[in-house]
Image: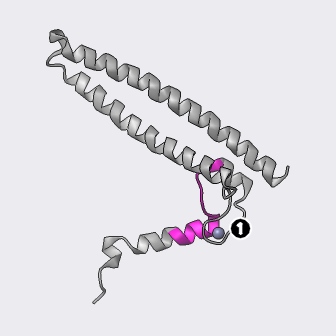
Amino acid sequence: MTRAQDIGQIRALLQRKRRDLLETALAARGEAEGLKAQDRDPEFEENAQVELADYTLSSLMETQRRELMQVDAALTRMDHGAFGECLDCGADIPYERLVALPFAVRCEECATEHEERTRLRTPMEAMPSL
Ligand SMILES: [Zn+2]
């Protein structure tokens, strides 16, 4: 397969993921609205379980929102022909890595380096050594 075909495969994968996310988000919103309707029902007034379910739903949706943003960002990078190129060294990120991690913006080597750099910036380690 050519690189363009590889990217085309990932695009199909991302678009499917995007559709799934939107469908799940819509279904979850329907459930959330159902819960709110229950809230107004006096019978459910002191129902802690409803609150808990509501909280679970909103955190679920937060995760989905973030994932959706990552999918959209990846698709935008594809439109600009930048998808699959390492942000740091510009090398083509291997197809296998992109399938496993479609949101990856760095090759494995640079990702490891980046992680190490990020770790060094954590407060504990940024403390001046005496
Ligand atoms: Zn790289």
Task: Reply above or below: 125 against 103.
Answer: below
Residue located at (61% from left, 70% from top): 88
Residue 87 in picture, x, y percent from top left: 61, 66
Location of residue 25 (image quadrant): top left
Residue 17 in picture, x, y percent from top left: 59, 36
Location of residue 19 (image quadrant): top right
Residue located at (69% from left, 45% from top): 10
Task: Reply above or below: 53 against 69.
Answer: above
Q: Residue furthest front?
A: 80
Q: Secondary structure at mark 1?
A: loop
Q: Residue furthest bottom?
A: 130
Q: Amino acid at mark 1?
A: Ala
Q: On the rendered structure, is 95 left or right of 107?
A: right
Bounds of the magenta span?
A: 100-114
Q: On the rendered structure, is 86 left or right of 43?
A: right
Residue 85 in picture, x, y percent from top left: 68, 62
Q: To which residue does mark 1 refer?
A: 91
Residue 70 in picture, x, y percent from top left: 52, 48
Quadrant in which the C terminus is drawn: bottom left
Residue located at (62% from left, 53% from top): 77
Task: Reply above or below: 130 against 35.
Answer: below
Foreground of the two, 68 or 1: 68
- Please state the quadrant of the image where ligand 1 appears: bottom right
Residue located at (41% from left, 25% from top): 28
Q: Is mark 1 within 8 Å of ligand 1?
A: yes
Location of residue 12 (image quadrant): top right
Q: Residue furthest right?
A: 1
